[in-house]
Image (spheres, grey):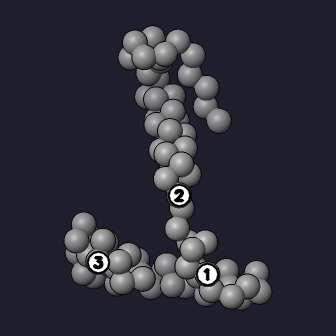
Amino acid sequence: MTAFFQKIAYKAGRIKAITATARNLAVVVYKMLTMGEAYDPVKLVRDGEQVRQQQIRQMKKKLVKFGITGADLGLFTNLEVG
C-alpha cells in the first residue's frame, strides 16, 4: 500500500492519495470478506500483458468514440472493438 500511496501522492497530491488508498484498502477488505479468502498481495498486481491488453481495449474504444478508423491512421485496415 505504501508504494500505491506514494505513486498517487506524486501524481495527484497527498489528499487524493489518502482517499485513493482508503478506497483501495476498502476494496481489498470487501473482497476478502465476500470471497472468504486470505489477503494475497500478489493477486493485486496485474502482469504487464494484462495492462497492455487493457490499454489496447481502451484505445480501440476511444477510436470508435471519436469516429477514427484504421484507414485514417494508416496503421491497420480493420478496427475491432471487443
Is 80 on the left-hand or right-hand side of 17?
right
* Mark 2 residue type: Asp
Q: Which residue is mark 1?
A: 40
Using the image, determine if residue 73 lies above or below residue 35: above
Marks 2/1 in contact by CB < 8 Å: the verdict is no
Q: Which mark is residue 78?
A: none
Q: Please give the name of the residue rendered at 52% of the width and 68% of the height, measured from the top-left corner.
A: 45
Question: Gap between marks 1 and 3, in whole Å?
Answer: 20 Å
Query: Which disc is residue 47 wearing?
Result: 2
Which quadrant holds the C terminus? top right
Q: Name the amino acid, label 1.
A: Asp
Q: Residue at x 55, y 44 (%)?
A: 53
* Residue in the image at 76% along x and 81% along y: 35
Q: Is residue 40 above or below residue 63?
A: below
Asked if residue 74 lies left or right of residue 50, the reply is: left
Q: Which quadrant would the N terminus be assigned to in this image?
A: bottom left
First in residue order: circle 2 vs circle 1 = 1
Q: Give the x, y percent position of residue 4.
A: 38, 75
Q: Is residue 20 above or below residue 63?
A: below
Q: Position of residue 76 (x, y in %)?
A: 49, 16
Q: Left of 23 or right of it: where is 42?
A: right
